[in-house]
Image (spheres, grey):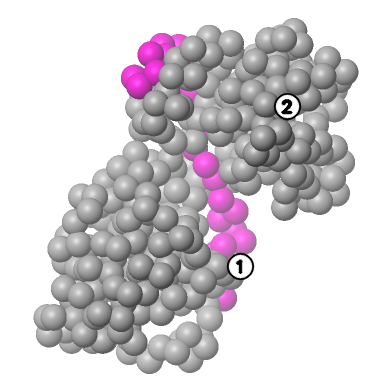
Amino acid sequence: MGAASRANAGFAAVVGPRSTAVRLRDAGPLAKYLQDVGIPVTALQASGAAAVLALTRLTTLLRRIHPAIVLSFLHQANLVSRLAAWFAGTPCCVSGIRVVDRRLGVTIPERVTWRLTNLLVACSESVALGHARLCGIPASRMAVVRNGVDVDTLQRVQPLSRGELGLGPDDFVVLMAGRLVPRQSPQFQLQAFKLLQQRPQSRRICLLIAGEGPERAALEELRNGLPDPTAVTFLGWRSDLPRLMKSADLFVLPSAWEGLPNVLLEAQAVGLPVAATAIDGSADLIQPGHTGLLFPPEDADAIAQIIAAQMTNCSTAQAMAANALQQLQTSGRWETCIEKFANLLQGLLR
């Protein structure tokens, strides 16, 4: 169950005497991990034109294994799981809500089907409130279990050397990580760098962008138009993101919308100061001036001001990072997330 939620990839977990993980499409990257710990994985192979078969295939599976609970994550998996559980007579259905998705293609089916669930579990308080208001769901049917990270492991991560990254020892390094897609609003980060480079600075400011996506070519064009394009490096997808975080001075997340961004949790766990847009999820993780900084969406000037201020007030930035880590130690651990989910499911079974 825990691994399914981390995968963020349309999983449903069927909980009974023996838990089973189900994925709407192929088995996915977590299949081996789940199988190694004794959890069978079923891939419904219901992508593209075959997506209509997911409901039939999942209903058949539920009728065969008779689970006590179906727990799903993400909109499509939630929708299919609710209907399949109803057709199969499964006694309990729980939906994981990862983001406030305002698209009509999501909100209309949600309004029609949420009553087929016993409980909807949001990843943050803002997501719970926003989703309930948007879809007409009473507060009594919503719960919150925040995402978690492996704080202890992330604390032990070693940084990459500045030389490996093509950076100078005195450079102030800003890191952005995520899919290069419109919802992440990465162009405002580059616009902020243009503003910074047009002003005199006491140190060279460099930007590392970790991630891939359809916006990369357009972003590279923006980078090439900067006064100093060499200060911005596109790293592509990285498997060593925590080590990159440990090598940076500030993490900035300019997203237009989020659920509860794990990437912010990871940055806080390695001790990196963070700044993010004041949106669902991010605002739940950051107390401005105490555990990080918030700025308005689509505001390049605000991003530039934050970067410049953090560079000249490193002690303040480090104090905020220490406060964020202390907060994670009590409320952001992966073990805490698992325990809360287990308690919710056990309560429903009783």
| Residue 137 on the magenta span | yes
Q: Residue at x 34, y 19 (%)?
A: 133
Left or right, residue 68 beside residue 208: right
Q: Is residue 30 visible?
A: yes
Near mark 2 (Cα within 10 A), the count class, few <14, some 14-19 or many ≥20, is some
Image quadrant where residue 181 sits = bottom left
In front: 345, or 92? 92
Amino acid found under the numbered disc labelled 2? Leu
Q: Residue at x 82, y 22 (%)?
A: 61
Q: Residue at x 44, y 75 (%)?
A: 234
Q: How many marks?
A: 2
Amino acid found under the numbered disc labelled 1? Ser
* CA–CA distance in space, label 1 to label 2: 34 Å
In front: 60, or 278? 60
User: Label 1, on which residue?
Assistant: 239
Task: Point out the stretch of residues depicted in magenta.
Answer: 133-158
